[in-house]
Image: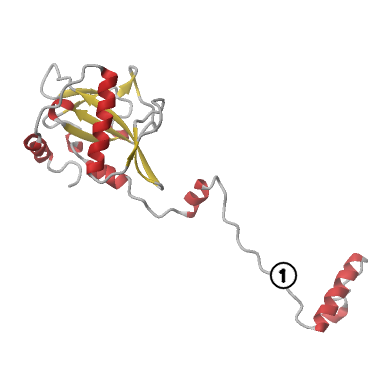
Amino acid sequence: MEAGDGCCCCRCFVATTMKRKPKIIKDMKARGEWAESIFIARASEHGLPVSKPWGDSSSFDCVVGRPGRFVAVQVKSTAAKLAVGTGYGCSVGHNGRSYRAGSFDFLAAYVVPEDAWYLIPAKEIRGMKGISLWSTGGKYEKYLEAWHLLSKACETEKKTEAEIAEARGGETQVEPQPAAHVPGNALERMLEVEKIVRKRMGMGVSSAEGIEE
């Protein structure tokens, strides 16, 4: 299913398959860690290999993919209903500021009360501090449970020579040099020796080789 198709069907599927309402964790840091663990479990269920970087100083929370194609994911969660209209407000910034371009590749936003995930390309929220989710006709509803976008982004493609050189630290492939000529008979060996001697003595090449001195 492509992004934008069957948004209502996705919401119905999430609602009908949900067994229980997840418990809301009040401590924000603990909730963030819990949301990351849920994301890792859900991504694994969709066949996506997930890694967690050491520490919490990176601008992303998880890495999805394999060598050759890694995708950085920032995980957010929300349980805050909008004051006006339907849906939930989700912070997509950090310390009151929007993330800089290149901080991550995808936002994985978890709407806790609905047990629903949004997989949104980073370019769609660039420069923003907050977005609305789980709202009928909303801008981001096409990314509801869009795990296929992560799968597609993680597909390993054949690398070009430039990409391989970049991965090697700028090292380029050296073209093989033609092998040096090896004299094949006694006459050729004698002429080769004579040539070397004449070069060392500052003399020209022998006329026997068809070249003027």
Badge 1 density bin: few <14, some 14–19, many ≥20, Cα 10 Å: few
On-image quarter of the C terminus: bottom right
Q: Is residue 107 left or right of residue 69?
A: left
Q: How is the image coloured?
A: secondary structure
Q: Residue at x 49, y 54 (%)?
A: 161
Q: Residue at x 62, y 63 (%)?
A: 176
Tell me how many marks there are.
1
Position of residue 120 measured from the top left corner of the image (x, y, whole percent) = 26, 35
Q: Secondary structure at mark 1?
A: loop
Quarter of the image for residue 186 reads: bottom right
Q: Residue at x 57, y 56 (%)?
A: 173
According to the picture, the residue beneath numbered tag 1 turns out to be 180
Position of residue 38 measured from the top left corner of the image (x, y, whole percent) = 23, 32
Three-letter amino acid code at the position of disc 1: Ala
Position of residue 111 measured from the top left corner of the image (x, y, whole percent) = 18, 28
Q: Is residue 136 left or right of residue 39?
A: left
Residue nearest the observer in this picture, 187 or 122:
187
Q: Is residue 167 left or right of residue 197?
A: left
Quarter of the image for residue 177 reads: bottom right
Position of residue 147 measured from the top left corner of the image (x, y, whole percent) = 23, 42
Q: Residue at x 10, y 21 (%)?
A: 85
Q: Is residue 66 above or below residue 22?
A: below
